[in-house]
Image (tube, rainbow, N blue to C red):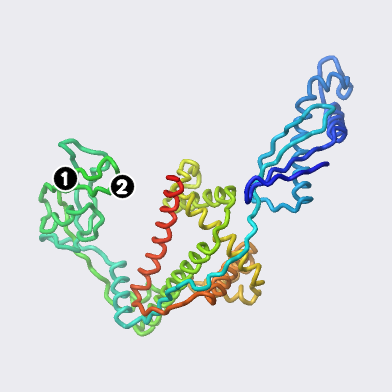
Amino acid sequence: MQVSVETTSQIERRVKVQVPASEVDQAVASRLKDTAKNVRLNGFRQGKVPMSVIRQRYGRGVRNEVVSEMMRERYVQAITQESLNPAGYPQIEPTVDEEGKDLEFVATLEIYPQVELNGVEGAEVERPVVDISDADVDEMIETLRKQHATWEEVDREAAEGDQVTIDFQGYIDGEPFDGGKADNHELVLGSGSFIPGFEEQLVGAKPGEDKTLNVTFPTDYQAEQLAGKEATFEVTIHKVSTQQLPEIDAEFFEKFGVEDGSEETFRAEVLKNMQREADKAIDNRVKQQVLEALKKANDIAVPQSLIDQETDGLKRQAAQQFGLGEDFDVSQLPNELFSEQAKSRVQVGLLLAEVIKVNEIDASDDEIQAKVEEVAQQYQEPEQVVEYYMNNEQLKNQIKSSILEDKAVDRLLEQASVKDVEMSYQEALQAAQQQSEDDDADENEASEDETQA
């Protein structure tokens, strides 16, 4: 077997392979003999059909099978011989495939990029410092009360914060439009869930009243056919309900797993959960800044095959998130919606793998156990969660990968210029969310720039 490799880009290779005709023809002949043993043709006993007839009837098909198998086998031998590290599957095409002639084929493949890692020295990273106050805990408890609130019907005008049960029909230029009608819809006034102006005009409405609302759809409304259009809604108010918050008592505490009926225990549990959420937000904000700095310092070529794999994974996540069902064909979702995020993830993954390799970072069994126990604390029966994780190699590997990634980020953070910034609990959560949105926006902008180029 003769092999030659052509470099067509930083990460693309064309591997040309030549296999002696004698090897191919011998393999075809052997396969035809095996085929002949089981062939049934009129006028011949099984296994007694002349080889000339077998070759005439089955020769081309058998050769195609043999050549296809041989190309796959010799491709693996070739990349092993040439020490190539493929990313994804190759495109294999025969260039010479004739009896009596050497088999020649070309495999076009992408390889993992060679990364000469640049550090993040000098990168500026803001690290939130959060002190959760009693007022923050009080605010969180009020939020929890609202989440467990009930609604009680009242016979009065609707006020902001009330829930109204309504029928509505929308019109543009006097004609009904798709999606503009609903019956017995429950709407909380002031929630901002409807277009601007709709909820405000229902403040003061009474049960049994009919109202006509005039509104204008925002220019950036998601349904393009409605964006910027003036609309009229005919609304019937059936009910007005006021929110009833649960009492802060033992019954309320029990809903959150506090069984001793103590408000002190309940507040401590709320504080612990808030601290966990704040720590997570801080870590995420710091991590995203570090990873963004790492990407800027290392503009590497990213194999398209890996981007495609990641894009497919993001599509499946989106389908699951929006409840589209397991049978939903994710190919219906446009690649453009996910490709830049996928490219960013692959780039970060490749760079972090190099950081882990260069710094010889590893995770011990004890560290994995400790991380699993930390994750398990979020569940009602942590002991069962720990046992489940520790007996599942796939889940253990996921935990190990998470540990290695965190250690790599910590190692990079040592190189950066870190500035502690005092923030409130809410500011820290909002900052982490804003960081994530900014990163998504940067990826989308990069995608648009590439498209225009």
Q: Is residue 425 above or below residue 88?
A: below
Q: Residue at x 81, y 22 (%)?
A: 40
Horizontally, is 423 left or right of 107 in the view?
Answer: left
Q: Is residue 62 above or below residue 389?
A: above
Horizontally, is 10 left or right of 134 in the view?
Answer: right
What percent of the width, then of the height, locates residue 150?
A: 26, 65
Question: What is the crowding at mark 2: few (fewer than 14 residues within 10 Å), some, or many (at least 20)?
Answer: few
* Image quadrant assignment for residue 368: bottom right
- Residue carrying label 1: 233
Which amino acid type is marked by label 2? Answer: Gln
* Image quadrant assignment for residue 59: top right
Q: Nearer the viewer, residue 39 or 257?
A: 39
Q: Residue at x 44, y 55 (%)?
A: 443
Between disc 2 and disc 1, the foreground one is 2
- Report the disc number at residue 222: 2
Q: CA distance from mark 2 to mark 1?
A: 19 Å
User: Does the rendering let one see residue 388?
Assistant: no
Which amino acid type is marked by label 1? Answer: Phe
Q: Residue at x 50, y 42 (%)?
A: 331
Question: What is the crowding at mark 1: few (fewer than 14 residues within 10 Å), some, or many (at least 20)?
Answer: many
Q: Nearer the viewer, residue 17 or 423?
A: 17
What percent of the width, then of the height, locates residue 182?
A: 24, 45
What percent of the width, then of the height, locates residue 382?
A: 53, 73
**Element under label 1?**
strand
Q: Nearer the viewer, residue 85 or 196?
A: 85
Quadrant where the image shows the C terminus: top left
The answer to whether mark 2 and mark 1 are in CB contact below 8 A is no
Quadrant where the image shows the N terminus: top right
- Report the disc number at residue 289: none
Residue sitting at the far top: 43
